[in-house]
Image (cartoon, grey):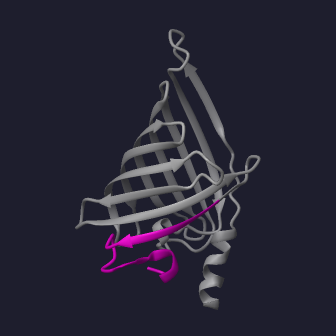
Amino acid sequence: MQGLVKKFLPLALAASLSFPLSATAENRNESQDKISVSSNVSILGGYFPGGFPVVDNTVIQGETNITRNLSNSEYTLTLWGSYDTHKDWMTEWDVIFDYTKHGKRADISLGYGYYDIPHTAIGKLNLVYGKIEFNMPLKPSAKIEHLFNDGSGHIMTLGIGHAFRKPVEVSGAAVYNHQMLIDDSDFTHLNGH
């Protein structure tokens, strides 16, 4: 147990330093229809997507989002990357297409993701997902992802989070993996898959 705590505590406590940049273009005919572009860079103590230990040292992660906001929904294209500062290489490149419908009590998202994870046996992945995030304190959420190449599998993530004054955001998640890139089903964040 002590080894588990020693291994994952820095990740759990890692503070994200964000450097946001954004721009917005509005359609003058309809004030609720706008396109926005935002980017941020984070420095983290490790990278464990879905509970998999990909990098256990400092990473720099960058993200750019291009979003078309409509009255109560949005379409987003996300370009994301993670850079391992110790090995001096990219550990992941992602392209994600997302549709989110905003509601009074919750936001519901559906999306497709293409993930390129070089330098690993994982390689390239294609998946679809659905997510619900409740509009209440701690923003509880549930997300289900389904891998549809190289076999199949599912990951379910239950999360919470809170944004303090920028640039500090704290979040946590429990991740249950049902045979996505592993041969069994388990809580991957606890068992080091």
Residue situated furthest front in the rendering? 105
The boundaries of the magenta stretch are: 171-193
36 over 88 or under it: above or below: above
Quadrant that contains the C terminus: bottom left
The foreground one among 59 and 190 is 190
Foreground residue, 35 or 115?
Answer: 35
Q: Position of residue 85 (x, y in %)?
A: 60, 65
Residue at horizontal 32 percent and vertical 59 percent from the top: 146
Q: Position of residue 48 (x, y in %)?
A: 52, 69
Location of residue 105 in the rendering, given as x and y in whole percent from the top left corner: 54, 42
Please tell me in which quadrant of the rendered image residue 120 appears.
bottom left
Question: Is residue 120 among the parts visible in the rendering?
Answer: no
Position of residue 186 in the picture relative to residue 29 (left or right): left
* Residue beneath the point at 54% across and 10% down: 28
Whether residue 128 is visible to the viewer of this picture, yes or no, is: yes
Q: Residue 84 lies in magenta, yes or no?
A: no
* Quarter in which the N terminus is drawn: bottom right
Residue 183 image position (x, y, % from top left): 30, 80
